Image (spheres, helix red, strand yellow):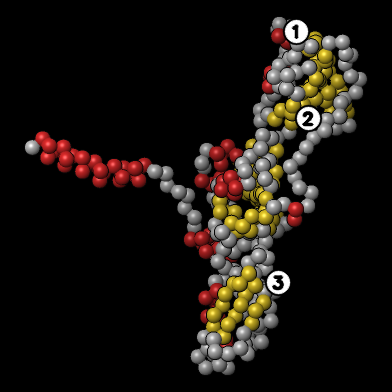
């Protein structure tokens, strides 16, 4: 009896365990139905093929005009193609050409999507990239595809959305991004600001759907430079208040040849440049308050035997931006 009970209990566990695992797994972010179908609709730049079954006389292949009509297929009545499904356009053609053809059968197909507006992701990402979007994609996936953030990432992402380059607006009757995300519109552009902290914490509204034509810029933090007699001279990117002692510690601390009584802070504000001479030893001893640093400050720790500079040093900076947008690599999301 004991053996039978053990076997029965084991079988029950085998059935219950998968159910528990499924119930505890995270629920994926739901994508609206209109967004799922958006890539299948006709966009500006698409090449559309119209085939009248059984005849070649009325067959047509072309693109859209600036007003969204099929360019050249308006002999009897203008046919709207922009942001419509292939089957809907075919139904319109059947209705119009039924006046001259007996029981016409029409097939409409998008044969080339390569000229659609691309989305662009640049700024503080490892691989600034252009994306041709052929399926729904959310912001987080796009950033991961671009290699993730760089060390100089700031706290905000800005999405610019030109009107008329995607079909979600027409399908929903709205030009807004997802609810809960701060946005503004003007000059034909919709601007959305997203906090990176919200995106990383999994806030759904901070991970919007990205559409054709979107321009996504990941903000870069403003650097503070630490040079001279420190173990790791480098730019420091801070998202909160940075002090002199903290900056020097972040740069690896002082080397053996450093003169801590001679720390120079070079600061430029507008057209004015100033040089502050700081005694780090007095700050450590509590005789002086620590110095709050500002963006683009240059901190130089003097080496023994060298006099402090009279003028601010020139810092060579690198940037991962590509000068020409078309030089960015192109990735197809399908």
For this orientation, the residue located farthest to the right is: 310
Q: Number of callouts in the render?
A: 3
Toward the left, the furthest residue is 1
Q: Residues within 10 Å of mark 3 (few under 14, many from 20)?
A: few
Classify mark 2: residues with Cα within 10 Å, few (<14), some (14-19) or many (20+).
some
Query: Is 55 above or below relative to 281?
Result: below
Q: Position of residue 156 (x, y in %)?
A: 64, 40
**Is residue 103 left or right of 223 when viewed as pictured?**
left
Q: Secondary structure at mark 1?
A: helix
Residue nearest the observer in this picture, 209 or 180:
209
Q: Is residue 296 visible?
A: yes
Residue 31 picture location, percent across and down: 49, 55
* Mark 1, residue position: 282
Residue 217 appears in the picture as rendered: no
Label ID, residue 66? 3
Question: Which secondary structure lies at badge 3?
Answer: loop
Task: Work out how far the residue at label 3 is from the one at label 2, CA to CA, in angstroms.
Answer: 46 Å
Q: Determine which quarter of the picture holds residue 126.
A: top right
- The answer to whether residue 220 is above or below residue 278 is below
Q: Where does the image place residue 74, in percent across and percent down from the top left?
A: 66, 83
Q: Which residue is mark 2?
A: 296
Quadrant housing the N terminus? top left
User: In the image, 215: left or right of 313?
Assistant: left
Give the CA distance from mark 1 to mark 2.
24 Å
Q: N-terminal of the two: label 3 or label 1?
A: 3
């Amino acid at each position: 009896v004991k053996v039978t009970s053990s076997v029965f209990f084991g079988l029950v566990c085998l059935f219950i365990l998968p159910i528990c695992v499924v119930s505890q797994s995270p629920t994926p972010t739901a994508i609206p139905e209109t967004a799922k179908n958006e890539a299948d609709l006709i966009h500006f730049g698409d090449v559309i093929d119209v085939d009248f079954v059984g005849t070649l006389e009325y067959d047509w292949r072309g693109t859209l005009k600036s007003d969204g009509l099929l360019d050249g297929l308006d002999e009897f009545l203008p046919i709207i193609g922009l942001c419509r499904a292939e089957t809907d356009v075919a139904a319109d053609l059947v209705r119009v050409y039924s006046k001259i053809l007996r029981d016409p059968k029409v097939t409409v197909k998008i044969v080339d999507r390569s000229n659609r507006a691309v989305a662009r992701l640049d700024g503080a990402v490892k691989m600034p990239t252009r994306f041709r979007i052929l399926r729904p994609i959310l912001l987080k996936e796009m950033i991961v595809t671009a290699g993730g953030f760089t060390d100089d990432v700031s706290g905000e992402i800005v999405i610019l959305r030109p009107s008329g380059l995607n079909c979600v607006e027409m399908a929903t009757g709205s030009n807004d991004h997802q609810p809960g995300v701060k946005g503004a519109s003007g000059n034909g552009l919709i601007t959305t600001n997203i906090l990176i902290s919200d995106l990383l914490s999994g806030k759904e509204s901070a991970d919007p759907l990205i559409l054709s034509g979107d321009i996504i810029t990941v903000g870069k933090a403003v650097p503070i430079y630490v040079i001279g007699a420190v173990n790791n001279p480098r730019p420091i990117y801070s998202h909160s208040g940075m002090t002199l002692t903290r900056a020097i510690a972040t740069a690896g601390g002082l080397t053996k040849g450093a003169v801590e009584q001679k720390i120079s802070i070079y600061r430029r504000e507008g057209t004015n440049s100033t040089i502050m001479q700081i005694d780090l030893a007095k700050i450590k001893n509590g005789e002086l308050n620590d110095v709050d640093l500002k963006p683009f400050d240059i901190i130089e720790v003097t080496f023994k035997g060298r006099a402090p500079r009279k003028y601010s040093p020139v810092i060579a900076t690198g940037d991962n931006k590509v000068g020409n947008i078309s030089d960015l690599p192109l990735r197809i999301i399908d």
